[in-house]
Image (cartoon, rainbow, N blue to C red):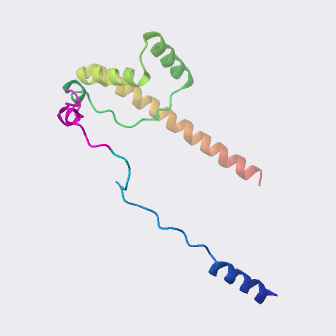
Amino acid sequence: MTDDLLSQIKLKAQQRKDVPVRNTSLLGSSSLSVPSPELENASFPQTTSPPEVSNLPQISKRLAVRLEDELRDGLEMLCKYEKITPETFLEAALVICNSNPGTMTLVLAEAKSRYAKRKIAGELRRLKTINQKYQHS
């Protein structure tokens, strides 16, 4: 029976219909009109960008920032009220900090303090998870 089935499959494969050759030329025999002299002499706008666009700063890819809940809510409210985005607020803050070394020193001190606290909190969460894992074993 398997020989019979195999022979039927082979027979079907041999009996395929021939497919007509397809015209793959790009222009083919379509009814394209010859360009008129008006189109040949027409001036189209240049594809280069205007000078104003080329002078704008390049924007890099998105940066995911995790914030404390209260600070995030405050930032969102401030940005919504002032009609700005958190990204532009952060950019402006960095520009101001770069132009004022005293402000930059204060910001960096606060950032280092927050970083140390977050590192300790992360370590405590990790130890808590390990403790729970071994208590349930």
Dividing the picture into quadrants, the one containing residue 8 is bottom right
Dividing the picture into quadrants, the one containing residue 56 is top left
Quarter of the image with the N terminus is bottom right
Between 128 and 103, the one lying in front of the other is 103
Q: Residue at x 42, y 35 (%)?
A: 62
Q: Residue at x 53, y 26 (%)?
A: 68
Magenta span contains residue 15 = no
Magenta segment range? 33-50
Q: Where does the image place residue 70, in percent across and percent down from the top left?
A: 55, 20
Q: Where does the image place residue 67, in percent across and percent down from the top left?
A: 50, 28
Most frequent secondary structure within the magenta stretch: loop
37 vs 72, left or right, is: left
Quarter of the image with the C terminus is bottom right
79 is higher (above) or lower (below) than 5: above
Q: Where does the image place residue 39, in percent across and percent down from the top left?
A: 23, 34
Q: Residue at x 66, y 49 (%)?
A: 130
Residue at the extreme left of the image, as rendered: 41
Residue at the extreme right of the image, as rendered: 1
Q: Where does the image place residue 10, in percent across and percent down from the top left?
A: 67, 83
29 vs 136, left or right, is: left
Between 3 and 49, the one lying in front of the other is 3
Q: Residue at x 62, y 45 (%)?
A: 127
